[in-house]
Amino acid sequence: IVKSGLPHYRSVRFITCDVTDPVSVAAVGLRADDMVYNLSAKMLSPIQVRAKRHDFFFPVNFHGTENIIQAMDKVGASKLVHYTTDMIYGHTVVLPMTEDHPV
């Protein structure tokens, strides 16, 4: 995005860090006026047994987001957009996937 040459994207910073590590998240240098897009993810590969799926995704999806929110709170940032995928539910059985889809 930064290399796109589009003037309205010049202030975008793409940051890579380990969201499960609070020190790593704090080190990115958030500012009060930042809008944070949390695109952190973990690939479901190899396929996890349903019973272990929670343990596989929870550190990134819950604790990682918690670490981001805490780092934002320390600097007074208040805008967060959190993205996730259907992979947190496992393989799709029926398309389109609805809220009634088996977990």
Image (cartoon, rainbow, N blue to C red):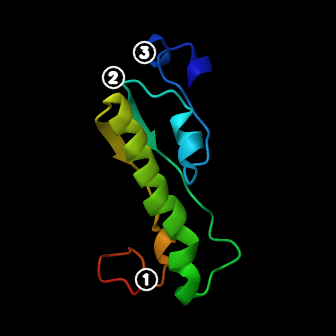
Residue in front for this viewpoint, 72 or 1? 72
Element at badge 1? loop
Q: Nearer the viewer, mark 3 or mark 2?
A: 2
> CA gap, disc 2 to disc 1?
42 Å
Q: Residue at x 29, y 77 (%)?
A: 99
Find residue 33 and report its horizontal and vertical position in percent: 33, 22
Find residue 11 and report its horizontal and vertical position in percent: 47, 17
- Name the kind of residue labelled 2 in the image: Asp
Q: Is residue 102 above or below residue 85?
A: below
Q: Which residue is mark 3?
A: 8
First of labels 2, 1 by sequence position? 2
Q: Is residue 93 found left or right of 42 in the rendered image?
A: left
Q: Nearer the viewer, mark 3 or mark 1?
A: 3
Residue 80: quarter of image: top left
Q: Which residue is mark 1?
A: 94
Element at badge 3? helix
Residue in front for this viewpoint, 73 or 100? 73
Taking the image as drawn, is residue 91 in sight?
A: no
